[in-house]
Image (spheres, rainbow, N blue to C red):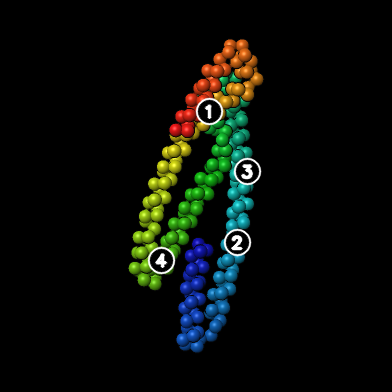
């Protein structure tokens, strides 16, 4: 709301300056609007700094809460659960910063709501000047919003399709650094087979 308020105060400041120049009115109103602009600027800086701190605290708390729940569940699982690739993918999925992603999702939703309110405020201010200005703003923004939506959808689909390949690659590569598995490689001699699987998986990811 601060950007909209700044635009509104700027409009009032411009009107008051015009009245001073054309009609010789007092400059007190103009000074009030200037002070209002300065206060809004200071408030905006304070909100931005507090937003960063709040996001850090929320992320820290969310990670703690989610990780504690995950740890409580994992200690109850049998050892054999951790031996399969599918379960490894599951553990990687639930242990990849869910708390942070929850906070990012929440902040993104709040930013969307904020931007919608700001856009409505701008549209209202322009409509007060002339309805055609508000109409032109909507016409200019519509293609940009459509392009952003298409790009975001494609990016999500691409990242989602790559995610399984990345996790499989991490699992296969982790076998080469596992002490127990390394002994099995020496004993049974199937390290080349696992290595080919890892290389094939990464080549699929490149494609």
The image shows residue 41 at horizontal and vertical percentages of 58, 66
Q: Local crowd at mark 4 within 10 Å, few (<14), some, or many (≥20)?
A: some
Mark 2 — residue? Answer: 45
> Residue beneath label 4, please?
124
Q: Earlier in the sequence, mark 1 or mark 2?
A: 2
The secondary structure type at the circle numbered 3 is helix
Residue 123 falls left or right of residue 202? left
Q: Nearer the viewer, mark 1 or mark 3?
A: 1
> Which of the two residues, 179 or 197, is positioned nearer the viewer here?
197
Q: Nearer the viewer, mark 4 or mark 1?
A: 1
Sequence-first tag of 1 and 3: 3
Q: Which mark is residue 169?
A: 1
Residue 60 - label: 3
* CB-based contact (under 8 Å), mark 4 and mark 1: no
Q: What residue appears at the point 57 percent right and 38 percent down from the top-left corner?
A: 97
List the single residue furthest toward the bottom.
Answer: 24
Name which quarter of the figure residue 124 lies in: bottom left
Cα separation, mark 3 vs mark 2, equals 23 Å
Residue 67 visible in the snapshot: yes
Marks 3 and 4, the one that precedes in the sequence? 3
Whole-number angstrom distance, CA of label 3 to CA of label 4: 39 Å
Distance between mark 2 and mark 4 Cα atoms: 25 Å
Q: Taking the image as drawn, is residue 91 in sight?
A: no
Tell me if label 1 and label 2 are in contact, CB under 8 Å.
Answer: no
Disc 1 residue crowd, few under 14, some 14–19, many 20+, Cα 10 Å: some
Q: Identify whether 107 is placed above or below 196.
A: below
For mark 4, give the secondary structure: helix
Q: Which residue is at a point 59% across and 68% down the rendered structure image?
A: 39
């Amino acid at each position: 709301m601060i950007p909209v308020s700044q635009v509104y105060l700027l409009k009032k400041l411009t009107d008051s300056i015009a009245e001073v120049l054309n009609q010789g009115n007092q400059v007190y109103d103009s000074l009030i609007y200037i002070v209002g602009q300065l206060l809004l600027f200071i408030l905006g800086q304070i909100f931005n700094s507090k937003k960063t701190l709040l996001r850090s605290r929320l992320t820290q708390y969310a990670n703690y809460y989610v990780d504690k729940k995950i740890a409580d569940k994992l200690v109850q699982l049998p050892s054999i659960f951790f031996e399969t690739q599918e379960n490894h993918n599951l553990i990687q999925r639930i242990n990849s910063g869910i708390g942070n992603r929850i906070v990012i999702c929440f902040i993104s939703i709040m930013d969307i709501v904020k931007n919608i309110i700001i856009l409505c405020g701008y549209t209202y201010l322009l409509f007060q000047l002339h309805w055609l200005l508000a109409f032109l703003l909507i016409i200019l923004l519509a293609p940009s919003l459509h392009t952003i939506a298409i790009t975001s959808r494609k990016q999500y689909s691409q990242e989602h399709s790559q995610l399984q390949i990345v996790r499989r690659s991490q699992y296969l590569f982790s076998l080469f650094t596992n002490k127990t598995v390394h002994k099995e490689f020496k004993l049974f001699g199937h390290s080349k087979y696992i290595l080919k699987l890892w290389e094939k998986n990464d080549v699929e990811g490149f494609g």
